Image (tube, rainbow, N blue to C red):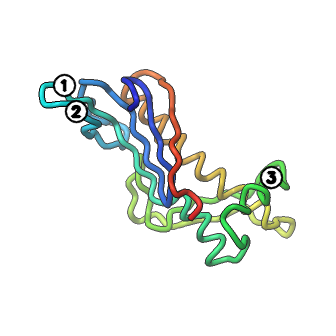
Amino acid sequence: MPRKGEAKSTYGTGAFILLNTGEEVIPSKHGLLTTLAFKLGKDAPANYALEGSIAIDGAAVQWLRDSLGIIRSASEIEELASQVESTGGVYFVPAFNGLFAPWWRDDACGVCIGITRFTNKSHIARAVLESMCFQVKDVLDSMHKDAGEEGETKNEKGQFFT
């Protein structure tokens, strides 16, 4: 269990990040949820957390595989993305179901911009992976603003590439 000031992230179809705020309930002013983290025992104090949920994370990789056919298996994305040093100006926003934390925009749609004649599937794969990182960074930035401190993030494996 993360200690106060530590964040835990779980990656799967989406991504879910919790920042333990200890016994202090911190109402978010930056687009996060305030939730009960855990209570160990009847007489133990409750620990609370700031929570940021990302709707589309690993699901974007599934989309590359199942809808576009850019990869045959989800495990291929890393090798494909590593064939280029940058996205080549391609940016991807995986708002297939709107955007969750910290934006909460149910009207947002997915976007892929910056495609030129020289864009290849490696650029798109890299843009998809980078979009996951940008979303996590948005949530962590909001957590740090709400909690007033930077902590340590612990990543936990989920069913990221199913």
Residue drawn 41% across and 65% down? 107
Q: Is residue 107 above or below residue 151?
A: below
Residue placed furthest toward the left: 43
Q: Position of residue 69 (x, y in %)?
A: 70, 77
> Which quadrant of the view contains residue 113?
bottom right
Q: Are marks 1 and 2 in contact (CB under 8 Å)?
A: yes
Q: Which tag, 1 or 2, sits closer to the chain's start?
A: 2
Residue located beneath label 1 in the image: 45
Residue drawn 58% across and 51% down? 132
Residue located beneath label 2 in the image: 39
- C-alpha gap between disc 1 and disc 2: 6 Å
Q: Secondary structure at mark 3?
A: loop
Residue located beneath label 3 in the image: 82
> Which quadrant of the view contains residue 145?
top left
Q: Position of residue 56 (x, y in %)?
A: 50, 60
Q: Secondary structure at mark 1?
A: loop
Give the residue type at disc 3.
Ser
